[in-house]
Image (cartoon, rainbow, N blue to C red):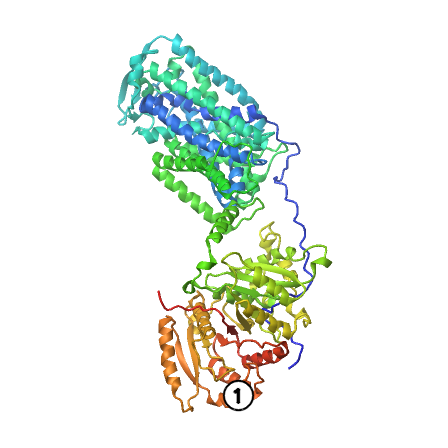
Amino acid sequence: MSNERTPLITSGVCGLAVTAVACGAESDAAPESGSGSPSKDPRKLNTFFGVMVPTILSMFSIILFLRTGFVVGHAGLLQGLLMLIVAYTIIALTILSICAISTNGAIQGGGAYYMISRSLGPEFGGSIGLMFFLAKVCACGEYVLGLVEAILDVFGSDPESSVSGGIRVLPQGYWYTVLYSSVVLLLCLLVCLVGAHIYARTAFVILLVVTTSLLSVFISSVAVKPRDFVITHKGPDNQTVHYNASYTGYNATTLRHNLGSGYSLDYSTNSVMSFATVFAVMFTSCTGIMAGANMSGELRTPSVSIPKGTITAVFYTFTVYVLLFILVSATCDRTLLIQDYGFLQKINIWPPFITIGIYCASLSAAMCAMIGASRILHALALDDLFGLPLAPATVTSSSGNPWVAVLYTWGLAQCVVFAGQLNAIASLVTVFYLLAYAAVDLACLALEWASAPNFRPTFQLFSWHTCLLGILSCLVMMFVINPVYSSGSIVLLLLLLLFLHFRSPTSSWGYISQALIFHQVRKYLLMLDVRKDHVKFWRPQVLLMVANPRSSCQLILFVNQLKKGGLFVLGHVQLGDLDSLPSDPVQQQYNFWLSLVDKLGVKAFVDLTLSPSVRQGTQHLLRITGLGGMKPNTLVLGFYDSCTPEDFFLQDTAFCDSSLGRGSEGEYNFGVDLPSLQAHFPPVRHVESPRWLSPEEYVGIISDALKMNKNVCLARYFFQLEGEGKDSKVDGSERTLDVWPLNLLQPGSRDYEDVCSLFLLQMACVLNMSSKWRHARMRIFLNVETESSDQGWVVNEETFRELLRKLRIRASIKIVPWDSVVQHHSHVDEEPTRALSEDFLSAVNCMLMEHSSLAAVRFLYLPRPPAHHSQAQQYLAQMEAVTNNLGPTLLIHGVTPVTYTDL
């Protein structure tokens, strides 16, 4: 035997001191801009113009003038105020979350989507972002329908379907409603194409007009005298129905009659109202709380403006709604409230005040929704979560206006107006918004529970209790409003989550899931007490030492099946001394190894170390790898021999086909594409004979592991193993696992029940339970001396069968007479490492070849290594001779009890 042996086999222990491929510094993130990047800074809006004004107008919208009577008339003052308090409690909890997230860092364009995606990651952020975009689109259509309803109340040509006096010039009907809505949408489109800045400045004028209209309502309640009205409608069967209604002025009797609920038929949809349907319409007024947040890309200081402006706007609108509810309850009878949604025009000192207010509020809310939706879509497109369909939405004008995203939004809003009636889509809009609000609360809750040191928002008026309460209240109200829409929206959310998960978008945003996992893993690791370990719950926890993955992939895949849900660590030792190096070379290598783990699809950790010798480095890894109760109990080494294995990178299509294209798309492989991965690990044929690992050191590693009470496995010929790849079609039922539990180098030993033999059986059984090996046939070979006068082997066989039954191991037992082998062995009781004759070793090898030549994997007993290093080469020569040309073989020496027969 030559003294120089080359451990190039599948998983040499190794730490080749090859020069690592330099990991380039991470490239600067590409600017998030479309094909027409803005040349000027679009951030021009302050708190008042950028947040307060759009939020107030969105929250007033059509509800303020067109649905206040609807809510109070059907629900009554008490239930109406209850609805208002519930709705504002829900949005108040969400606002606390918005304020916390928005004051924890710089906010970019996209508002709520940006907050959710940067907190919860691309899958959840993308799916909720798309649903929030759809909610904005539906809200835009709803506001347009409300505006058209108000226009037809005044200008509609059918007096029997109208409730307020006016100039009758516009034809009415479903298709006319769609036509008018399309014209209004086109007007919104033109304004939005000009840009958000024009809207923001005109919005202030609109707010002044709406405020003036509001003041006229309060003044009219005192100035206008009581009067009666006759209201005409077409009933469900096209019959004409007349209603007598009254405006009483402030009257205690009117207020008392309007305190309770009086749910009845809604004349616009001809359906009976309930608490849920009325709340759905009323809650539409609360869906504007993110109007300011959605303008985050245009705000000068979003982290300051969003919380301050949103809270102020919400307090203002809540006060207005409460006063308006009380006013109409005390001055109008229920018939007027229910049968004429435009009644405020009739009781105003100058009806055009209300008409102008309705038009301005509805039009501004529609434009705000369109602008907000387009910004969300633009942010989604920039993040490239949905690929090609949204790619055009990245385009912006020279001023930064995402005009293509505006066109997308306009097209979808055009589809929404085919609903024809405001109340018909109110429930869908509300459910979508509630789901988005629940997601914002979830994002804040996750950040709070993760306890990340960098989550320290300047806004402190929140806790995990408010976040959790916000989530629960949103989900409960969703199902109260409309269980069908709620279930459908959640299903849609899950489908989007699955789509984004399988599309595997990666990002540099940071994943809250990682922080939460860390938090939980740390907690459970502390609970995993090694003092409570029990043998019946034992499982392999493997440290596999890898020299070069090119020659070790088959063994890595095999051990992945062998671990049985236990810890699996790939270890590598790089030779070197940190004192003589400018920096630690190991840190730069982790990304390459982790990318390899991803490419192979194995569930393994990676642990690398720098050490002057492989033996010392392996000792380091055996001691420090793992944490708490999750530490390796088994060391797997590649066999120390001179054969050169095949290069797995040249065989597997995953490492050599055109799949490298996906790696070039930004950060899909976290900065490591396929060419870099191939270059980092040198080809097998270029690896020189290592002088850094002598036979003595290799055997010393085995001895060290046994001294540290670790089980040891030596793997030979595993580069020949077939069927371990992800796409392998090898039928498991055609494979056999052969177990030789006897120490074949000590024929005098007949103990099949020692710790090492039982460990051998357990490892074979564990492999047989794994997914790819569960259909393999397991065979156990018992060596007997049939010519001996002592017939105890018969009893031993029965005892062994009984042992297998107790251990629940399903295997066939093969009796192998080996008298012809034993006759070449000396019966002198010497050390186990004595010089065995070549004839004996050859005879053992021939016996194994005769019975196990067709086995997929062989499990053999590994004798304990010699105590003196001078016998290391002899020990390795014996192992090599016994396993010569056998095929994939695992030599195992177990030191820990692993079997248990009781419950």
Residue type indicated by callout 1 = Val
Nearest the camera: 317 or 633?
633
Q: Is residue 514 visible?
A: yes
Q: Position of residue 795 (x, y in %)?
A: 36, 83
* Residue 10 vertical position relative to residue 118 in the rendered view, above or below: below
Task: Name the residue located 49 percent from the left edge and 53 percent from the top edge.
Answer: 525
Q: What kind of element bears circle 1?
A: loop
Q: Position of residue 762 (x, y in %)?
A: 44, 70
List x then y, in percent, for residue 402.
Answer: 57, 35
Q: Is residue 438 above or below residue 873?
A: above
Question: Left or right: 669 with respect to 446?
Answer: right
Residue beneath the point at 38% across and 36% down: 478
Give left or right: position of 454 versus 469: right
Percent of width and height locating residue 900: 39, 68
In the image, 589 versus 411, the foreground residue is 589
Quadrant housing residue 306 = top right
Look at the image and tell me in which quarter the C terminus lies.
Answer: bottom left
Residue receiving disc 1:
828
